[in-house]
Each structure stands twice: as structure tokens, then as C-alpha cells.
Image: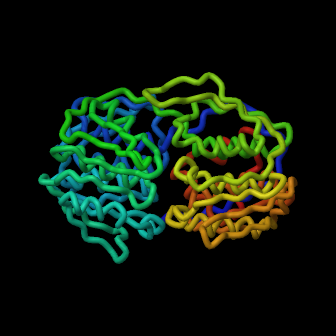
């Protein structure tokens, strides 16, 4: 386990500059995995080189593929073909990444190999039964700790059967795990989702040559189907800048007077833009310029300027498109004029931490009035002025909690300290130096 790294963020002047945040984490994970089961070479530009993604690269090597970075920073993956993954000689350590663990569990489940998955203390607390339950119906077997938690052993099968599975909870990770098991399963595997979730898996599988279809059902749900046992061919992938990572400098610019930032090539997949839709509703001055596509994913350059924000009601059906962005939205809401109500946040309780409780506790420590509802809602009462701050906030090994409160500290009357910023590198390597280069004041607090 890495040593705790306390960080302190102080009020700063205007934030200015043009930047590209690191590559999209969701797309980076998938590009390595899909390249590993394709025939030939996959070339990846702009891969996120955070700890989470590097754990995925290491896992694919243990499963028989090659995944290496060249001197120009381009990653090259030589795949083993669909069904060709080898039994690893070591435990697969997925670090802090629930995405990597859940998707890879689905991918190996349709191979006649046995794999043991583990992670750090945070990941080993997260529920995996939501993935293993449908995969057991397909023919794989699992041995896990109580509650379906890691460490977990997958006893895969090359005789898996297709299923039609209705998701009980909106989750792109669960949907993807089932589709990836179905990829190496004869027949058609279908996942039905009541609310659309991230579709990076579907888009990228098509890019590699798979047949993936979506159909709107009579009840309004979406049926996503994959035809099993295609031949996947190596591809070139341009990874967009991560919209979840871009959220932190974007909100920081909105909160600091005189600020103006241009964020380049930010992924604008409509199933990922809930935060930006919400910020615009709050009155944020965000212009979406130079819209275009990168390898099938829409992107835009975001021009963000400081301006006043007002409280809004964020509907529950928006949660799948911004599930990782509620902590930074809460920081923005703390500085807005009026009350912001965020509905349908149950899924936040099973992220890297109980994010709903952690956000509420941190805001309260910083002098913000908040309420957590019995319906898993979060109400933030903004005054139109920055909060007092002057607190140390617990992060529970959660990178997004750490970055969100460091952004809040840039606007607060007194500095805000987080007890551990070491885990920021899992998703946003170089966050502190990048923000300080724009004019922020983040320093070690040890």
C-alpha cells in the first residue's frame, strides 16, 4: 500500500491556460483488453498511463498478450485472438479499478482457465456479485470472499451459453462483463437496461469488428446484443481526453474569478456528459468548440470561463451519465446561489468509497449545509459565496473525493486539506503539477 500523501489547497487567483487532460480511463481499459483478444496489432495513441490502466496492461501480459509503450508514448498490443487467453501464472492485481476487475472477470469467464483476482484495500471491499451472478448463469464458476468480494477466483469455461439478462441496477461495468463473456460464447447474448449506461464497450467492439446491436423495447428499455465468436482485428485507437478528469479543472475555472481555460479533445459521448449538461443548467459559461470524432467517439474543445452558478435539481435518470462526477458537482453546488438537489445517488455508496457519505461529511466540515435523504439524495445549500473551508477532509483512498475537495479549497476562504492524495494517480497522473501550472496552489501538507 502506498504511503499517505496529505495535500493542502489554498485560494488562488485566476486560472488560465490551454491543456489536455489525460486520456479517458474507460476507453483506455477497453483498448488494452480488446487489443489483447484481437488478431494482429492494436496501436493506441493517448492511453491514460495512470495506475489503474497500468494494472490492466500488466494483467493482459499475464494472460498471454503483449502490451508495450514505445519511445514516442504510443502503446502497441499484440493480441492472442478471441478465445486465446492463457491461464496466468500469478494473481491478477487490479489495483484500485472496479472497471478493470469487472470487465476482465467477464472476459476470462468464457475461457477454460482459472484466474485469481485481487486489488487494493478499497477495491477488495467493492461488490462483485452483481457481475458473477449473470456470469454463473452463462456457465462460469466463482469462489470469493463473503459478499462476493475480492480476492475472487474465476473458474472459466469454454462451454458458456448465451443469456438474456435484465440489469437490476444501471451499470455499464456489469453490462460490459456480460457482453465480453458473450463475445466468446456461441449464439447471441443480450443485456437489457432500463436506463442507458456508458456505451464505450459497444462502440469499441464494433470498431474491432464485432456485431453489436441495440434495440428499443416496448417498455422503453434498451436491449444490447452481441453475436458470439466473431474475429476481432487489431485497430488504431485515438483515446479522447477523459471528461471525468476534465471536470476538475473545468469546475475550478468556474469558481475562480477571472479564470478562462481551454480543455482540448474532451470526450463528449452523450452518455458521459451529464455533469456538463448540469453545469450549463446552473448557468456555467462553457462553450463546446470544434466538435468532431476520434475513432468513433465524439469530442470537443471546452472553453470554460468564471461566472456565477445557481442551484438546480438534478434528476435521478441523469445519474448513469455522471455517476463519477457527483463529488465535483457538489463542490460547485457549495459555491452556487441557492439549493442544489441531486437525486438517485444509491450507486455512489458502492464506488471507491461510500461517496455519498464522504461528500456530505467533507462539505459539512468545510462549513456547507447539506442533507442526505433516505432516498439516497444529496441536498447542498449554496449561499452564492465560497464556503469557509479550513478543514481536513478524509478521502477513504478515493481519488475523486481527493481532487474534488482540492478544487473546493481553491475557492474557499481558508485552505482545505485532504488526508491522502496518493490515489489521485490512479486516474489523473500529474494532477497537482498540471493544476499548479494553471495558477492553483496545491502543496504537500505533511
Colour scheme of the picture: rainbow
Where does residue 186 sit, x and y in percent of width and height? 15, 45
- Judge from the rendering whether residue 435 lies leftward or rightward of residue 353; answer left or right: right
What residue sits 27% from the left and 63% below the top? 116
Quadrant position of residue 150: bottom left
Q: Is residue 27 visible?
A: yes
Position above or below: 294 against 153: above
Where does residue 190 sit, x and y in percent of width and height? 29, 48
- From this viewpoint, which residue is outermost toward the bottom? 146
Where does residue 337 sit, x and y in percent of width and height? 84, 53
Q: Quadrant of the C terminus?
A: bottom right
Numbered circles on residues, count = 0
- Judge from the rendering whether residue 221 lies leftward or rightward of residue 241; answer left or right: left
Position above or below: 284 against 290: below
Position above or below: 219 against 209: below
Where does residue 260 sit, x and y in percent of width and height? 77, 34
Q: Is residue 101 visible?
A: no
Position above or below: 168 against 308: below
What residue sits 42% from the left and 40% below the top? 200
What residue sits 82% from the left and 44% below the top? 256
Quadrant position of residue 26: top left
Amino acid at each position: 500500500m502506498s504511503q499517505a500523501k496529505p495535500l493542502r489547497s489554498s485560494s488562488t487567483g485566476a486560472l488560465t491556460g490551454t491543456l489536455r487532460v489525460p486520456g479517458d480511463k474507460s476507453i483506455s481499459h477497453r483498448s488494452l483488453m480488446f487489443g489483447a483478444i484481437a488478431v494482429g496489432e492494436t496501436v493506441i495513441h493517448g492511453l491514460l498511463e495512470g495506475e489503474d490502466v497500468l494494472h490492466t496492461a500488466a494483467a493482459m501480459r499475464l494472460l498471454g498478450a503483449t502490451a508495450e509503450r514505445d519511445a514516442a508514448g504510443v502503446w502497441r498490443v499484440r493480441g492472442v485472438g478471441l478465445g486465446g487467453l492463457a491461464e496466468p501464472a500469478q494473481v491478477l492485481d487490479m489495483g484500485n479499478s472496479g472497471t478493470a476487475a469487472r470487465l476482465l472477470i467477464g472476459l476470462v469467464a468464457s475461457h477454460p482457465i482459472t484466474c485469481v483476482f485481487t486489488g487494493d484495500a478499497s477495491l477488495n471491499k467493492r461488490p462483485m456479485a452483481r457481475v458473477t451472478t449473470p456470469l454463473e448463469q452463462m456457465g462460469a464458476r466463482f469462489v470469493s470472499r463473503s459478499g462476493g468480494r475480492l480476492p475472487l477466483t474465476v473458474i472459466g469455461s469454454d462451454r458458456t451459453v448465451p443469456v438474456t439478462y435484465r440489469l437490476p441496477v444501471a451499470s455499464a461495468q456489469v453490462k460490459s462483463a456480460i457482453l465480453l463473456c458473450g463475445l466468446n460464447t456461441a449464439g447471441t447474448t443480450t443485456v437489457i437496461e432500463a436506463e442507458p449506461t456508458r456505451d464505450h464497450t459497444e462502440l469499441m467492439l464494433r470498431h474491432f469488428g464485432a456485431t453489436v446491436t441495440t434495440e428499443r423495447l416496448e417498455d422503453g428499455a434498451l436491449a444490447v446484443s452481441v453475436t458470439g465468436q466473431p474475429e476481432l482485428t487489431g485497430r488504431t485507437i485515438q483515446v479522447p481526453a477523459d471528461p471525468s478528469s476534465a471536470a476538475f479543472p473545468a469546475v475550478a475555472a468556474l469558481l475562480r474569478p477571472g479564470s478562462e481555460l481551454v480543455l482540448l479533445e474532451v470526450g463528449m459521448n452523450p452518455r458521459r456528459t451529464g455533469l456538463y449538461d448540469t453545469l450549463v443548467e446552473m448557468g456555467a459559461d462553457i462553450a463546446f468548440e470544434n466538435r468532431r470524432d476520434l475513432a468513433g467517439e465524439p469530442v470537443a474543445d471546452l472553453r470554460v470561463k468564471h461566472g456565477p452558478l445557481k442551484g438546480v435539481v438534478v434528476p435521478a435518470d441523469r445519474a448513469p451519465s455522471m455517476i463519477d462526477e457527483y463529488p465535483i458537482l457538489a463542490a460547485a453546488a457549495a459555491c452556487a446561489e441557492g439549493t442544489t438537489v441531486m437525486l438517485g445517488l444509491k450507486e455512489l455508496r458502492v464506488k471507491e468509497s461510500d461517496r455519498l457519505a464522504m461528500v456530505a461529511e467533507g462539505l459539512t466540515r468545510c462549513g456547507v449545509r447539506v442533507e442526505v435523504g433516505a432516498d439516497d439524495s444529496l441536498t447542498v445549500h449554496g449561499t452564492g459565496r465560497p464556503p469557509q473551508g479550513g478543514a481536513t477532509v478524509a478521502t477513504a483512498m478515493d481519488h475523486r473525493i481527493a481532487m474534488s475537495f482540492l478544487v473546493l479549497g481553491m475557492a474557499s476562504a481558508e485552505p482545505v486539506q485532504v488526508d491522502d492524495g496518493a490515489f489521485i494517480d490512479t486516474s489523473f497522473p500529474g494532477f497537482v503539477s498540471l493544476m499548479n501550472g494553471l495558477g492553483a496552489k496545491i502543496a504537500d501538507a505533511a
